Image (cartoon, rainbow, N blue to C red):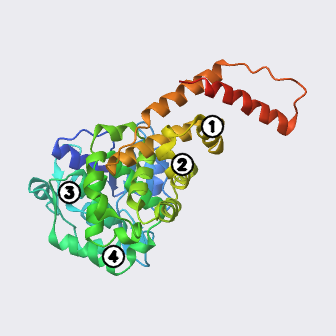
């Protein structure tokens, strides 16, 4: 029988009365060979992590770590049956995440994480905290998730130390994007960015952004019910757009940082569309029908209509955040009717048309339908 403990977020959330479905376990006194013999499936490349044969929950062997080079991956891990539970907990980031619970429901709390939860404090465990640059973003995210908690003064100084030592520059785009996505799920991305800004990390992660200018208005939007109309990646796009909308930097800043964060291809396509056609999108509802039709043709509406709908919605919210009055709802409704009419229409086109002329005739028929819209 292996000796296992529930660890991390599941224990923290249980103490705080928060429901969770994410359960991770640490195993003490075992080895990879023993875990495999018990039917566990190995999944870890850098250190021994296994999936339970029935529940598929993660079980990791207790381990220690040693810093050997810069960056998030610059650690050497040691997993052995002689690694204790306390040694494993000590390598974690903050005290509230370094609490374990045994099978009988007893808490093992060597770093007073429960006390810090009671006192609403986000506190690092040891000075080794400064060795992992990802912890800057994680602490910022925990502050956003638990806004009534305070970051301990010494912990905040370590955040600044990581930034000053340029460790944070070694973070991969994938890890940064993953933490940003999680913060959107927590509904408080602006507070996360505020922490990053205060410790100097935001300028490295998203350089030259206008965060201080949009902070208040953006916070009102991203905590509103309107934000839920956008999926997480579209919220990230909107955030980049408002961070760089000003001084003609929308293309330079938003597009460059979308690439830097390695957003999915759809997101990069969408942010290009909004950035490059922003002035047309603002006034598209006031344009004549020929101009409107030429525009939707230019942005590939007939192959990817969802991109134009998304770009109009982003533009609408961007204007709301900037407190500028433009009504794009009517045009979006018109597009929906147009899309529906197209799907119901069977074009009768003379078979004499071929190649480029065929395409032109199809567009002519489409424009005829578009002209009939009120």
What number is the disc on residue 96?
Answer: 3
Precedes in sequence: disc 3 or disc 2: 3
Q: Position of residue 62 (x, y in %)?
A: 34, 60
Q: Is residue 52 visible?
A: no
In the rendered image, which residue does mark 4 sit on? 163
Precedes in sequence: disc 3 or disc 1: 3
In the rendered image, which residue does mark 1 sit on? 290
Question: Which is more toward the observer, 172 or 261?
Answer: 261
Name, please, the residue furthest toward the front: 288
Q: Residue at x 32, y 63 (%)?
A: 211
In the structure shown, which secondary structural element does the residue marked by tag 4 occupy? Answer: helix
Tell me whether circle 2 and circle 1 mark residues in contact (CB < 8 Å).
no
In the rendered image, which residue does mark 2 sit on? 270
Mark 2, Cα crowd under 10 Å, few <14 / some 14-19 / many 20+, is many
Which is closer to the viewer, label 3 or label 2?
2
Mark 1, Cα crowd under 10 Å, few <14 / some 14-19 / many 20+, is few
Q: Is residue 97 above or below residue 51?
A: below
């Amino acid at each position: 029988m292996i000796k296992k403990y529930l660890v991390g977020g599941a224990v923290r959330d249980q103490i705080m009365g928060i429901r969770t479905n994410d359960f991770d376990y640490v195993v003490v006194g075992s080895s990879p060979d023993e875990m495999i013999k018990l039917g566990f499936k190995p999944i870890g490349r850098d250190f021994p992590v296994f999936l339970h044969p029935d529940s598929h929950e993660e079980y990791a062997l207790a381990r220690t770590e040693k810093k050997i080079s810069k960056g998030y991956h610059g650690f050497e891990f040691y997993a052995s049956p002689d690694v204790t539970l306390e040694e494993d907990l000590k390598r974690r980031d903050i005290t509230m995440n370094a609490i374990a619970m045994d099978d009988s429901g007893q808490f093992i709390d060597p770093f007073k994480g429960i006390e810090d939860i009671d006192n609403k404090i986000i506190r690092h465990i040891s000075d080794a905290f400064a060795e992992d640059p990802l912890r800057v973003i994680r602490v910022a995210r925990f502050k956003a998730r638990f806004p009534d908690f305070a970051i301990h003064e010494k912990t905040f100084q370590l955040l600044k130390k990581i930034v000053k030592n340029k460790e944070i520059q070694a973070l991969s785009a994938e890890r940064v994007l993953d933490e940003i996505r999680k913060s959107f799920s927590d509904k408080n991305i602006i507070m996360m960015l505020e922490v990053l800004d205060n410790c100097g990390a935001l300028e490295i992660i998203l350089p030259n952004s206008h965060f201080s200018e949009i902070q208040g208005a953006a916070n009102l939007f991203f905590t509103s019910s309107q934000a839920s109309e956008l999926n997480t990646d579209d919220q990230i796009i909107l955030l980049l757009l408002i961070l760089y909308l000003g001084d003609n930097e929308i293309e330079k800043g938003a597009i460059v940082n979308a690439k830097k964060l390695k957003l999915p291809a759809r997101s990069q396509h969408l942010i290009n569309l909004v950035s490059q056609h922003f002035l047309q999108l603002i006034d598209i509802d006031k344009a004549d029908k020929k101009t409107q039709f030429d525009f939707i043709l230019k942005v590939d509406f007939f192959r990817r209509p969802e991109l134009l709908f998304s770009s109009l919605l982003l533009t609408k919210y961007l204007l709301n955040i900037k407190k500028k009055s433009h009504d794009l709802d009517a045009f979006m409704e018109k597009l929906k009717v147009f899309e529906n009419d197209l799907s119901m229409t069977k074009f009768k086109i003379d078979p004499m048309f071929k190649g480029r002329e065929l395409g032109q005739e199809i567009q002519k028929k489409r424009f005829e339908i578009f002209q009939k819209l009120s």
